[in-house]
Image (cartoon, rainbow, N blue to C red):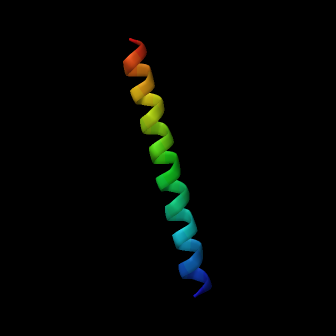
Amino acid sequence: MLMKRKQLQQWQISLFWGVLWNQKINGNKHQS
């Protein structure tokens, strides 16, 4: 159970960074 919760947390973090990174790239595209 603890391992599963840790994996879920890692998945949420990677998803969060993925969205953040996409927004950064999209923002750069809009500027240029």
For this rendering, which residue is in front, 3 or 32?
Answer: 32
Q: Is residue 14 positioned above or below 19 on the image? A: below
Residue 19, horizontal then vertical, whole percent: 45, 45
Q: In this view, does 13 lie above or below 4?
A: above
Residue that protrudes farthest toward the right in the picture:
2
- Depth check: 31 or 17 in front? 31
Residue plotted at (38% across, 18% down): 30
Q: In which quarter of the image is residue 10?
A: bottom right
Q: Which residue is drawn at 39% across and 28% down?
A: 26
Question: Percent position (x, y) of residue 23?
Answer: 45, 34
Q: Farthest residue in the bottom direction?
A: 1
Image check: 27 left or right of 1? left
State the quadrant of the N terminus: bottom right
- Toward the top, the furthest residue is 32
Q: In percent of the image, x 38 and y 11: which residue is there?
A: 32
Q: In this view, does 6 lie to the left or right of 30?
A: right
